[in-house]
Amino acid sequence: MTTRAQQTAIRTEIVVEAPAERAFQVFVDQFDKIKPREHNMLQVDVAESIFEAHAGGRIYDRGIDGSECQWARVLVYEPPTRMVFTWEISPHWQLETDPARASEVEVRFVPETPQRTRVELEHRHLDRHLDGWEGLREGVAGPDGWPLYLQRYADQLR
Amino acid sequence: MSAPEDLVPDCAQRYLSSGFTGALVSASLRLVTAYAVHQLDALGDPTRRAIFERLVTRPRAVGELAGELPISRPAVSQHLKVLKSAGLVIDEAIGTRRVYRVDPDGLAALRAELDRYWTTALATYKQLVEHTTQEDL
C-alpha cells in the first residue's frame, strides 16, 4: 500500500544527452517551448511563457493581447544542480488565489557522465490544492453535502 | 512590465467566466476534476449513484453492498469498476476482502493529470536539449 506522502507527489525523469550546465540552461531558456500549451488560463492565446531565472522570479504566460497570468514563483535557483518553483494552478486548471494552496515542483539535474544528465522532476504537496476538503467532507452527509452534489451531477446530465 | 498584483486579474477573469457556470460553481466546483465528464457518466446510472452514496457514508466491501442493494455481487463489482476508473472511488485489500471508499479528494485524478503533463513537457524538453546547438541559446 502506498503512503500518503507518496500519493501527494508525482515523480518523473528523463535522461538527456547533454552536460548538466546545458541541460539546466535549456530548461529555463526554452521553458516557453517545453510547457504544454493545452491549459491556458488567459482568455486569449498564449504568445509566450516567461521563466525569470532567479530565486524570487516569476513564471508567467503572456497572451497575444499583452495580458499576463503569473502561475508560479521561483523558490530555489541553483544552476546547474536544481530549481524549485511553486505551482499555483488548481486541479481545475484555474489560478490558485490562496498561496497556501500552491504545490511545488523541484527539478534536479544529476550528471551521469560529463555529456549525459538525468533530469528528475518531482511535483509535490499536491494535497495542498485540496486543503479545505476535510471540512467539506464533514458536511457530506447533510442536505448540502453529497446528496446535493449528486443531484447537481444528475441535473447536468439532463 | 506590470507588478505581480496586476497579473492576477487577467486569469482571475477567466475563472469567473469559465465554463463552470450555474449549479456547478462554488463548492461543487471543487468536486469536478479534469475527469468531470467521466464522472458525470459514471454517476449517471441510478444504481451506481446508490452505490456511491453508500460509500460516501462509510467504506464498504463488495459483499456488503450486494447485501444492501437489490443487485447481484458481480453486478456490484462491475459498477465499482466504472466508479474506480472514473477516479471516484478507491479500493484497498483488507484481509480477504476488498473494501471500497470514496476517493476523498480527487488526488488520484490530479496525479494522473500532472503525470501526463510533465511527461509531455520532459519529452519536448529532451528534443530541445538534444537538437539545439549552443549557438541557438
Image (cartoon, helix red, strand yellow):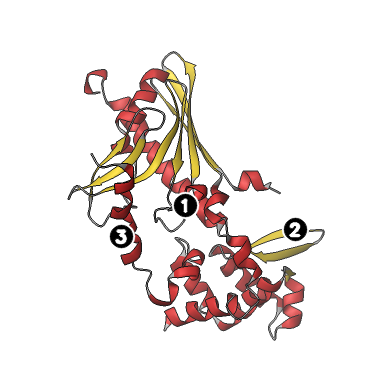
Query: Mark 3 falls within which chain?
Result: B
Residue B54 lies, with reference to residue B14, above or below; the image says below
Please, what is the three-letter code of the amino acid marked with disc 3? Gln
**Do badges 3 and 1 share one subunit?**
no
What amino acid is at disc 2?
A: Ala
Q: Is residue B103 visible?
A: no
Please determine whether, in this image, residue B65 is positioned above or below residue A108.
Answer: below
Picture residue at 31% right of the left edge, 30% below the top: B128
At x 68%, y 83%, the residue is B71
Could you tell me which secondary element the residue under label 2 belongs to?
strand
Nearest the eye: B55 or A106? A106
Q: Which mark is residue A135?
A: none
Residue A45 percent location from the top left of the image: 23, 52
Residue at mark 2: chain: B
Residue B93 - label: 2
Task: Find the distance from the CA under tag 2 to the CA under tag 1.
Answer: 37 Å
The answer to whether residue A111 is visible is yes
Q: Secondary structure beneath disc 3?
A: helix
- Badge 2: residue crowd in 10 Å (few <14, some 14–19, many ≥20): few
Which kind of residue does numbered mark 1 sit on?
Asp
Q: Can you give x and y, in whole percent of width and height, for residue B59 in the image?
A: 72, 68
Q: Which mark is residue B13?
A: 3
| Quadrant occupied by the C terminus of chain A | bottom left
Between B29 and A57, which is closer to the camera in this rendering? A57
Q: Residue at x 39, y 56 (%)?
A: A94
Indicate whether A8 appears above or below A140: above
- Say whether disc 3 or disc 2 marks the residue closer to the N-terminus: 3
Circle 1 — which element? loop
Chain bearing tag 1 is A
Tag of residue A98: 1
